[in-house]
């Protein structure tokens, strides 16, 4: 019995590490068309945990880094239909992206936390050459 209980606890804890969180608001807050020039580009200077932002004009096959000014934030990147592309703690790195238009769901923790404090969110094409 103890081994079944231990297995259940380990399964529960391990599955929590792979959360996929979605913005809780109906409309995006913030959004950009990516410059794809290798420089860090601001998405918003005040996203809350629970927001999502639309990001357009990504270059298919390029690598991108999505960051937040809050080191414990958790991002879920989806296509426009909310199919998950990647998720994880910031910075979230996506190699060889397959979509030109995405949504960045911003949460304050891997348990899909919401928060009202502003955070600056950014995108950078890491495989693009800066101007």
Image: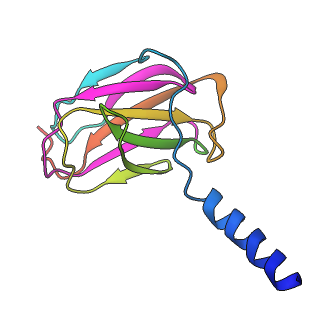
Looking at the image, residue 24 lies above or below residue 40: above
- Where does the image place residue 128, in percent across and percent down from the top left? 14, 47
- Where does the image place residue 111, in percent across and percent down from the top left? 66, 45
Q: Nearer the viewer, residue 67 or 104?
A: 104
- Tell me which residue sits at (18%, 52%) in the image: 127
- Where does the image place residue 95, in percent across and percent down from the top left? 26, 57
Bounds of the magenta segment = 41-70
Image quadrant where residue 29 sits: top left
Residue 19 horizontal side relative to residue 76, left or right? right
Looking at the image, residue 123 lies above or below residue 118: below
- Tell me which residue sits at (62%, 62%) in the image: 15
- Where does the image place residue 1, in percent across and percent down from the top left? 88, 83
- Judged from this view, the residue extending furthest toward the right is 2
- Tell me which residue sits at (60%, 59%) in the image: 17
Looking at the image, residue 63 lies above or below residue 23: below
Q: Nearer the viewer, residue 48 or 21?
A: 21
Residue 90 horizontal side relative to residue 40, left or right? right
């Amino acid at each position: 019995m103890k081994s079944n209980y231990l297995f259940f606890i380990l399964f529960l804890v391990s599955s929590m590490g792979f959360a996929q969180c979605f913005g809780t608001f109906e409309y995006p807050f913030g959004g950009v068309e990516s410059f794809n020039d290798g420089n860090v580009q601001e998405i918003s200077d005040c996203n809350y945990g629970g927001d999502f932002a639309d990001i357009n004009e990504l270059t298919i096959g390029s690598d991108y880094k999505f960051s937040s000014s809050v080191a414990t934030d958790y991002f879920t990147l989806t296509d426009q239909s909310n199919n998950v592309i990647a998720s994880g703690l910031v910075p979230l790195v996506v190699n060889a992206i397959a979509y030109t238009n995405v949504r960045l769901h911003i949460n304050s923790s891997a348990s899909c936390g919401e928060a009202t404090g502003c955070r600056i969110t950014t995108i950078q094409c890491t495989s693009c050459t800066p101007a």
